[in-house]
């Protein structure tokens, strides 16, 4: 009798230990549904998802001289970064002073290395779909953003929207 109670308690502890990971999966699945609803309802755009990043083009360069972003390139961006709820948490100083209007310090344009893991995963993956002069919304769940951490103005487990203009691509 005591062995069965012990095994029962061990089973209960194992089940409780696994429950948080299931909850995290539920959160990410819910975020993906919220993102898709936002894209189709609010943006009235088609769902275009690759590697976990939802891509909504604003301007596209279809010329034969298109300078695509590739792994290892340095890119200069103008951008705004928001949570899916719409709260602005960062913007470049090229983003029409949106950051200043929101009481944030705008970030200077800097060269960012793409595709090498130096950026948050959603931004890294999304930029690889773009080219110089193109603008897009890159939307992704918390697992490709800042994760479970509360970072600056970004609450933990926040889905993110980056409105990005690739100003320059340096090969």
Image (cartoon, rainbow, N blue to C red):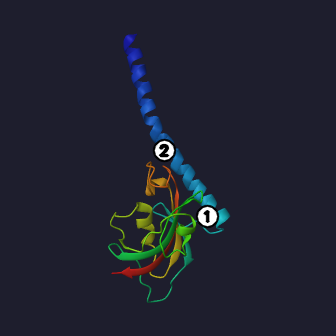
The image quadrant of residue 144 is bottom left
Residue at the image point whose x is 45% and y is 30% from the top: 16
Side of 144 relative to 72 (left or right): right
Residue 151 or residue 122, whichever sits in front = 151
Q: Is residue 110 above or below residue 143?
A: below
The image quadrant of residue 84 is bottom right
Side of 79 relative to 74 (left or right): right
Q: Which element carries disc 2, helix, strand or loop?
A: helix
Q: Is residue 35 above or below residue 136?
A: above
Q: Are marks 2 and 1 in contact (CB under 8 Å)?
A: no
**Location of the C terminus (image quadrant):** bottom left
User: Badge 2, how many Cα within 10 Å: few under 14, some, many 20+?
Assistant: some
Label 2 or label 1, whichever comes before in sequence order:
2
Estimate the x, y position of residue 92 in percent, counting from the top left. Answer: 47, 71
Q: Which mark is residue 10?
A: none
Image mark count: 2
The image quadrant of residue 167 is bottom left
Q: Residue furthest bottom?
A: 64
**Location of the N terminus (image quadrant):** top left
Q: In 3D space, how far apart are the residues under numbered discs 2 and 1 (Cα atoms)?
A: 22 Å
Estimate the x, y position of residue 65 in percent, counting from the top left. Answer: 43, 89
Residue 11 or residue 144, whichever sits in front = 144
**Which residue is labeled 1 in the image?**
39
Q: Residue furthest top?
A: 1
Residue at the image point whose x is 45% and y is 41% from the top: 21
Estimate the x, y position of residue 109 in percent, counting from the top left. Answer: 42, 74
Estimate the x, y position of residue 131 in percent, counting from the top left. Answer: 45, 79
Residue 113 or residue 125, whichever sits in front = 113
Q: Which mark is residue 24?
A: 2
């Amino acid at each position: 009798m005591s062995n069965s109670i012990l095994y029962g308690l061990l089973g209960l502890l194992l089940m409780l230990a696994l429950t948080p990971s299931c909850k995290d999966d539920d959160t990410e699945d819910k975020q993906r549904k919220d993102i898709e609803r936002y894209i189709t309802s609010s943006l009235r755009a088609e769902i275009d998802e690759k590697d976990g990043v939802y891509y909504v083009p604003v301007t596209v360069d279809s010329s034969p001289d298109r300078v695509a972003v590739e792994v290892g390139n340095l890119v200069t961006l103008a951008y705004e970064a928001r949570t899916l709820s719409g709260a602005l948490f960062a913007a470049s100083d090229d983003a029409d002073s949106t950051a200043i209007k929101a009481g944030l310090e705008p970030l200077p344009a800097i060269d960012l290395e793409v595709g090498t893991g130096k950026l948050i995963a959603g931004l890294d993956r999304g930029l690889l779909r773009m080219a110089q002069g193109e603008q897009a919304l890159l939307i992704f769940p918390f697992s490709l953003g800042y994760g479970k951490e509360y970072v600056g103005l970004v609450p933990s487990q926040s889905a993110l929207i980056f409105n990005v203009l690739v100003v320059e691509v340096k090969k």
